[in-house]
Amino acid sequence: MMKQRFKSPSSKKANSNSLREQVYNDLRMAILTGKIVSGTRLVESTLAVEMGVSRTPVREALHKLDLEELVHSIPRVGYIVNDMTEYDIEDLFSVRTAIEQLAARWSLGRITPKEIEKIENNLEKADRILKEGSTKKMIGLDTEFHEIICKASRSKRLCQISQILREHMLKFRMACLHIPEIAKRARDGHFEIFKAIQSKNLQRVDDSMLRHMSETKKDILNYMKTLRENLA
């Protein structure tokens, strides 16, 4: 079931295209962050009332989410929010590792002093957060770290793909980064990637990113296993 009621679109002047995008983005992020949990039935008419819109943008949004495999359609029932399996995680990380490694490689020789400074600030903030025990703030820094490297690659397409892959595992990463030891491991992984980029050693860059992605995947799989054991 949904954990909260959706708000009506904030801008009364929104045109039909922006309204469609807003409805789609709101539903998509609610699923990706776990506000709408796996197995929830999504009914077009109910969502339209809750979001304060007509059924058309909701129908279009659900269709797009179906194509993205975040939901699936059942005739005369509606849409059901898909669960993510261990295979899905393995599949996502196989692709994401290749994308993140490529971004880090391409950042060599292209990353600017200002971007280096941004990474240093990111790591310093992570250290403060870990010291304070405010691990819930780590998800933003985790996202920022990888975005800086992607932008340093100077490839818009690579950044778009990386963002989509990160978003698809968002609810699991949010849950895992609340755990202090996992948050610390993520920060350490980021530091090793940063030092590898500074060294301009291609093999070191590949190895550090692979190690970080492998650890992240393991943390998420362990979290999923524990979660399902507790629900059994």
Image: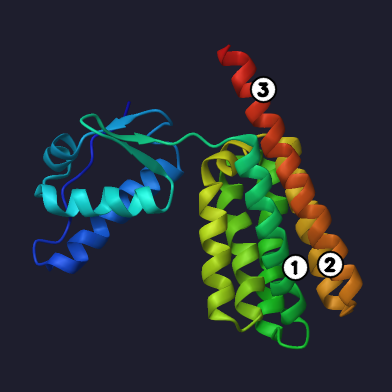
Quadrant the C terminus occupies = top right
Q: Residue at x 14, y 61 (%)?
A: 11
Image: 60 above or below 181: below
Q: Of marks 1 and 2, which one's residue comes earlier in the chain?
A: 1
- For residue 34, above or below residue 215: above
Q: Is tag 3's residue or tag 1's residue first in the polypeptide sequence?
A: 1
The answer for how far apart the CA atoms under marks 3 and 1 are is 29 Å
Inspect the image, locate mark 2, and give the three-letter code of the amino acid beneath it. Asp
At x 84%, y 61%, the residue is: 208
For disc 2, the marked residue is: 206
Residue under label 1, please give it: 101
Q: Secondary structure at mark 2?
A: helix
Relative placement, left or right, of 143 versus 201 is left
Please tell me which residue is depicted at 72% across the width and 80% down the height of the picture: 107
Q: Identify the mark nearer the N-term, 2 or 3.
A: 2
Mark 1 vs mark 2, CA separation in Å: 6 Å
